[in-house]
Image (cartoon, rainbow, N blue to C red):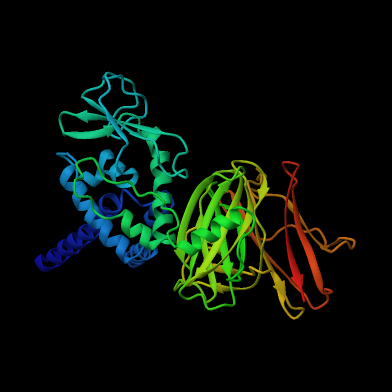
């Protein structure tokens, strides 16, 4: 009996050790940078094998260099951020340093009442501040985090020495946007991420914020400048598309895809997002080749605010370059009934595991390969993928009541529509992902306008989206 109890005790110790390992990873090691969707996905996992694979994939998305330099930065934060109860990286100030970096200004405001929704340890009631305060001002954060200055106010806790947010509810959405930006930088520009994550030499609350740098390759910069002026070079031929989508939780994101028949294994892609007046909003330079993509194909997620934009896309190969400008209308989907961009494709891959929602042209375990040039042969099957957002749900059936009409119009010919039908797709949160296909054998050669119109019969609303493709 004693032996049985020893075995049971050792088993319990092992379970606790494993629980501590995963809790420490989630709540200490990656607390600053793990996004809400990643956090929720990790918490939903049932087995240690799933958790180990998640952690492996989490760092694979960000890269080895990012991981190593991030861990150095965490170690530095733990050294310089005061706290008697927690590690520095667990604190509000530590997370701010990691995600927002060095403030442009530091102030010591007069003590004020703590607003409702302060730190996790606070009651949700106003009351006199219990310690000194510090205010950090960020004037030049990336626009995807905040287009306007951000003020962060901390309150010192005399009992723990820890600096906590005076208004945690205000800061949570800003930090979440910063996590999305951090992931975007790590995925889209490894060299930039490495530079941004270098540990700071004098980091007592003064680290350097990771900010998007301008394109550095001279031929690529010149090509983007020329394209923005209306005369982009054509020395490196390529095709490009820009699209807009929404996650199941209502977050808007945009994608860029580039393809070329040329050997671009050593090439770089430059992306410059401008507002309707031509003012630069965001710019990045990324290697064309990516081990996760097939040769001759590039894709990236580019976060921009809602509105009308111009996207200059350039490809530089040695001393030659090509560039062009695309228009991009970004909808603030919110709760509006709407459709995504339409993806036209010749094929897709079945993945072994689901990818994050913002992974370009990837829907769970399905990776669609968009036809960037939108040119098909009559022997091809036209594969379409689109998403329906914010459809109303019937309280009785707990299902939407939708009707979709797909219309093809060749040149100035009379439009031809497929029979109206209920879209058959996968519903996740606020969206339905719909795949469908059409054999092209009986389609005459030519250029077509493809439009999809979906009616929400419950809300009595209609939404549409359109694109073009060519049959040769």
Q: In front here: 279 or 87?
A: 279
Residue shown at the point (45%, 63%) measured from the top left: 286
Q: Is residue 353 visible?
A: yes
Q: How many labels does the image show?
A: 0
Image x and y of residue 158, in percent: 16, 28
**Above or below, comparing residue 44 to residue 368 in the picture:** above
Specify the quadrant of the image occupied by residue 197: bottom left
Residue sitting nearer the eye, 7 or 394: 394
Q: In this view, does 411 lie above or below 305?
A: below
- Residue at image position (71%, 58%) is 423
Judged from this view, the residue extending furthest toward the right is: 414
Apparent side of residue 290 relative to residue 296 in the rendered image (left or right): left
The answer to whether residue 19 of the structure is visible from this angle is no
Quarter in which the N terminus is drawn: bottom left
The image quadrant of residue 420 is: bottom right
Locate residue 359, reporting x and y percent: 50, 61
Q: Where is residue 131 in the image (x, y as percent from the top left)?
A: 20, 24
User: Can you tell which quarter of the image residue 419 is in?
Assistant: bottom right
Q: Which residue lies furthest to the left in this view?
A: 2
Residue 16 in the figure: left or right of residue 176 = left
In this rendering, position of residue 395 left or right of residue 50: right
Vertical arrangement, residue 206 with respect to residue 301, above or below: above
Location of residue 71 in the rendering, given as x and y in whole percent from the top left corner: 24, 57
In the image, residue 237 above or below residue 275: below
Quarter of the rendering occupied by the C terminus:
bottom right
């Amino acid at each position: 009996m004693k032996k049985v109890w020893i075995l049971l005790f050792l088993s319990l110790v092992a379970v606790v050790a494993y629980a501590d390992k995963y809790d420490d990873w989630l709540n200490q090691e990656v607390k600053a940078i793990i996004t809400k969707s990643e956090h929720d996905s990790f918490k939903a996992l049932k087995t240690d094998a799933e958790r180990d694979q998640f952690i492996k994939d989490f760092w694979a998305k960000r890269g080895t260099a990012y991981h190593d330099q991030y861990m150095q930065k965490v170690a530095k934060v733990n050294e310089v951020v005061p706290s008697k109860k927690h590690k520095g990286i667990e604190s509000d100030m530590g997370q701010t340093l990691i995600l927002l970096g060095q403030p442009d200004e530091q102030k010591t405001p007069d003590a004020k009442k703590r607003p409702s929704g302060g730190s996790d340890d606070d009651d949700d009631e106003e009351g006199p501040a219990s310690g000194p305060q510090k205010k950090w001002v960020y004037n030049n954060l990336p626009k995807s985090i905040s287009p306007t200055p951000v003020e962060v106010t901390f309150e010192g806790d005399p009992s723990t020495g820890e600096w906590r947010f005076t208004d945690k509810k205000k800061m949570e959405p800003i930090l979440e946007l910063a996590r999305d930006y951090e992931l975007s930088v790590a995925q889209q520009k490894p060299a930039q991420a490495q530079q941004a994550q270098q540990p700071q030499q004098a980091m007592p609350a003064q680290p350097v914020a990771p900010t998007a740098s301008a394109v550095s390759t001279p031929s690529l910069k010149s090509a983007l400048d020329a394209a923005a002026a209306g005369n982009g070079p054509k020395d490196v031929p390529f095709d490009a598309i820009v699209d807009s989508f929404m996650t199941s939780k209502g977050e808007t994101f945009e994608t860029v895809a580039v393809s070329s028949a040329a050997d671009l294994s050593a090439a770089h892609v430059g992306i410059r997002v401008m507002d309707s007046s031509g003012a630069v909003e965001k710019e990045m330079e990324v290697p064309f080749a990516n081990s996760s993509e097939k040769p001759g194909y590039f894709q990236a997620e580019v976060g921009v605010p809602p509105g009308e934009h111009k996207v200059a896309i350039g490809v530089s190969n040695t001393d030659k370059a090509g560039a062009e400008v695309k228009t991009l209308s970004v909808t603030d989907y919110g709760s509006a009934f709407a459709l995504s961009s339409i993806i036209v494709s010749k094929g897709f891959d079945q993945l072994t595991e689901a990818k994050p929602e913002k992974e370009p042209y990837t829907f769970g375990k399905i990776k669609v390969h968009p036809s960037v040039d939108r040119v098909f042969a009559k022997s091809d099957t036209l594969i379409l993928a689109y998403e329906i957002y914010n459809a109303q749900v019937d309280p009785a059936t707990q299902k939407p009541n939708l009707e979709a009409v797909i219309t093809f119009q060749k040149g100035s010919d009379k439009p031809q529509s497929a029979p109206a039908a209920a879209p058959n797709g996968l519903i996740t949160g606020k969206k339905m992902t719909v795949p469908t296909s059409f054999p092209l054998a009986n389609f005459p050669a030519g250029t077509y306008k493809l439009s999809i119109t979906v009616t929400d019969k419950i809300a009595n609303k209609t939404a549409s989206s359109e694109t073009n493709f060519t049959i040769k």
